[in-house]
Amino acid sequence: MMPLLEVDNLTKHFALQRGLFARTVARVRAVEEVSFSLRAGETLCLVGESGCGKSTIAKLVLRLIAPTAGTIRLGGDDITRLGATAMRPYRRRIQIVFQDPYASLNPRLTAAQIVGEPLENYSDITRAEREERVATLFEKVGLRTDAMNRFPFEFSGGQRQRLGIARALALNPSIIVADEPVSALDVSVQAQVLNLLMDLQDELKLSYLFVSHDLGVVEHIGHRVAVMYLGRIVEIAERTALFAAPRHPYTQALIAAAPLPDPRAERRRIVLEGEVPSPIAPPPGCAFHPRCPFAFERCRHERPMLKPAADGRLVACHLAEGEPVAM
């Protein structure tokens, strides 16, 4: 079956300009040659440290910003270079839930107007039909219909995020890009919103591109996980396999640093030295080699390609070509 979303060698560089004539003095390599696919009914999680390029990929996939290179296919159609008018039909098929439920809702609109705005912009249904559809969406995300005429400031953080989810569902999309959708919420509310997303996925056969830095959230909601470092994907694997036996040293360090539910449990820590390199001047060879405890000479000169390992996952590591690295 053809994937709903295919990304091939996606690259995005941002120009740094200075001076009176805005001369380009450097380029930020935010995303470098990223490739992945998203299947129907699947949740693919993008994880990594802040600044690794996760949110940039989300914006590129949504065509909110234009890529420097690479291709984006939605349902087999190449949307990489489409203009605003040509993109309109595709906007119905891919929607977004934003990170901040406080900043992503227009404070001057009522809740019903916020949820109904996509219908007003992208469909020709009557006002009565739109109101009926909005009421149905409120019920679907667990909001009371008698709150439809309230303004965003009258809702809690979790309720506002439910409004954002209802708005994303308005046009019956097949894909929802969720950019850190629970990071601004209390832990108890996070679980409610995550369970709502999972229930909606089962009911509506949705696919999620889920951006997060929280491995606990990823382990709860993801089907497959793509780990990013300095603008590149370093490992893609099924969720269970990734958490049970991470292959890339950076993935191992991420999982080892995550808190365990049982405070008495012990786990070997992998201490990474130094800081994340600048995306303006990434190191030669493997970008992770200055911090990797297992780096050897080849890592300093030859960049590893993302390719299948023995168990079927994709890993960009010279060590993965042999035996797995022991944690």
Image (tube, grey):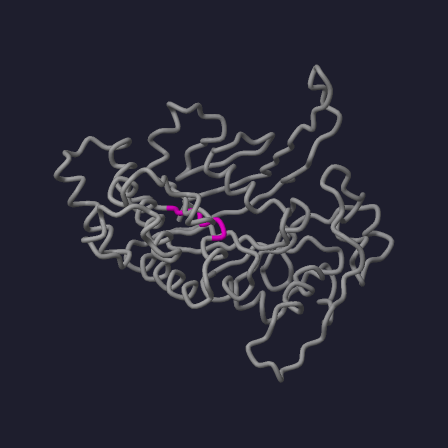
Q: Quadrant of residue 124?
A: top left
Task: Identify which residue is drawn at 26% across, 48% down.
Answer: 150
Where residue 149 appears, x then y in whole percent? 22, 46
Instruction: Name the outermost residue toward the right.
Output: 297
Between residue 236 and residue 58, name the one nearer to us.
58
Task: Identify which residue is drawn at 12% across, 39% down.
Answer: 128
Instruction: Name the outermost residue toward the bottom.
Output: 264
Where residue 79 appears, x then y in whole percent? 45, 31
Q: Which residues are magenta?
A: 175-180
Q: Quadrant of residue 237?
A: bottom right
From this view, report whether residue 251 is shown above or below residue 67.
below
Where residue 49 appears, x then y in whole percent? 64, 54
Instruction: Name the outermost residue toward the front.
Output: 154
Where residue 171 appears, x then y in whole percent? 28, 41
How many marks are shown on the rendered structure?
0
Task: Identify which residue is drawn at 75% across, 43% down.
Answer: 278
